[in-house]
Image (cartoon, rainbow, N blue to C red):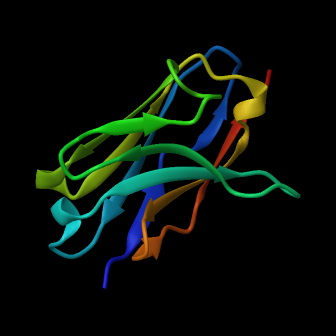
Amino acid sequence: QVRLVESGGGLVQPGGSLRLSCAASGSIFSTLAMAWYRQTPGKEREMVATITTSGMTNYGHSVEGRFTISRDNAKNTLYLQMNSLKPEDTAVYYCNAPYVAWGQGTQVTVSS
């Protein structure tokens, strides 16, 4: 069983940056593909970025060029570096190990 715990959310001004972290329990993190999703009230959960076990990445169109997903297998941690943030990036961000586990989410609010 894998438990995922996100951190790093908060309030930031437009144009600012935040880095989200997702700490995974257990010893199988390095064998898992991972992803970040986000959701706003009344909307479906949206894929933000994915990363394979070998480090290949994929991004949603709305964040490509601004967000970077990465992983540190030695620390069992997934990251999402978010730059040039926009108000429309405001959402609850979730860490996901496909078919295995979801985190509880962390709120990101982009507002002046």
Furthest residue in direction right, as rendered = 42
| Residue pictured at 56% horizontal, 68% vertical | 104
Rendered residue at 64%/14% (across/down):
15
- Vertical comparison of 33 with 55: above or below: below
Left or right of 78 in this view: 83 = right
Q: Residue at x 62, y 41 (%)?
A: 10
Identified at 33% across, 50% down, the residue is 78
Residue 80 falls left or right of residue 72: right
Please name whichever residue, 6 or 49, is drawn nearer the observer in this view of the structure: 49
Where's residue 108, x and y in %? Answer: 65, 42
For the question of whether residue 31 can be seen, the reply is yes
x%, y% of residue 89?
70, 33
Quadrant in the rendering for residue 98: bottom left
Where is residue 45 shown, x and y percent of the image?
69, 57
> Would residue 32 be found to the left or right of residue 98 on screen?
left
Pick whichever, 96 or 86, lies toward us: 96
Q: Is residue 110 visible?
A: no
In the rendered structure, the answer to whether residue 43 lies left or right of residue 73 reads right
User: Residue 52, image x and y in percent?
Assistant: 28, 49
How many marks can you see?
A: 0
Q: Is residue 44 above or below residue 67?
A: below
Q: Quadrant of the C terminus?
A: top right
- In which quadrant of the rendered image does the N terminus lie? bottom left
Q: Where on the picture, by quarter, is residue 60?
A: top right
What residue occupies the far left of the structure in this picture? 74
